[in-house]
Amino acid sequence: MPRKKDPTFEAALARLDTLTHILQSPDTPLADALAAYEESCRLLDFCETALHDAEQKLSVWENGRLNALVLDETGAHTND
């Protein structure tokens, strides 16, 4: 069975916002809340991957040279 096409990053964020409202509602039935939670986990994974891929494509201008963006384990820019 072919896999459904991944959403855009922006569409995934919008859907995560909707799911957050669903999960915060006291009127949401448990089964719906669990389904919303599972979907939000998948979307979060997708968004984290998309952000990581974007970071890898970024470059920074330093000391008159264009260098690859290098981040440390906290996500801060390093001078490597």
Image (cartoon, rainbow, N blue to C red):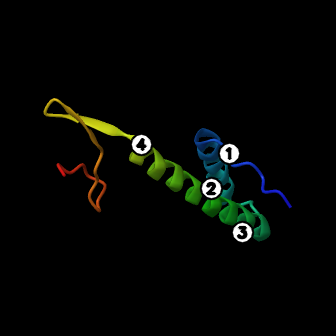
- How many discs mark residues in the rendered view? 4
Image spot of residue 72 (x, y percent):
26, 58
Residue beneath disc 4: 57
**Dot 2 and dot 1 residues touching (CB under 8 Å):** yes
- Reply above or below: 61 against 46: above
Q: Amino acid at mark 1?
A: Pro
Residue beneath disc 1: 7
Image spot of residue 57 (x, y percent):
41, 42
Distance of label 4 from label 2 (alpha carbons):
21 Å
Front disc: 1 or 4: 4
Label 1 Cα crowd, 10 Å radius (few <14 / some 14-19 / many 20+): few
Distance of label 1 from label 4 (alpha carbons):
20 Å
- Reply above or below: 38 against 69: below
Dot placed on the residue nearer the N-terminal end, 3 or 1: 1
Residue beneath disc 2: 43
Front disc: 4 or 2: 4
Q: Amino acid at mark 4?
A: Lys
Distance of label 4 from label 3 (alpha carbons):
35 Å
Front disc: 3 or 2: 2
Q: Of helix, strand and loop, which one carries label 3?
A: helix
Front disc: 3 or 1: 1
Q: Of helix, strand and loop, which one carries label 1?
A: loop
Q: Of helix, strand and loop, which one carries label 4?
A: helix
Distance of label 3 from label 1 (alpha carbons):
21 Å
Residue beneath disc 3: 34
Image spot of residue 32 (x, y percent):
77, 64
Q: Amino acid at mark 2?
A: Leu
Image spot of residue 8 (x, y percent):
63, 41
- Reply above or below: 51 against 24: above
**Dot 1 and dot 4 residues touching (CB under 8 Å):** no
Distance of label 3 from label 2 (alpha carbons):
14 Å
Distance of label 2 from label 1 (alpha carbons):
9 Å
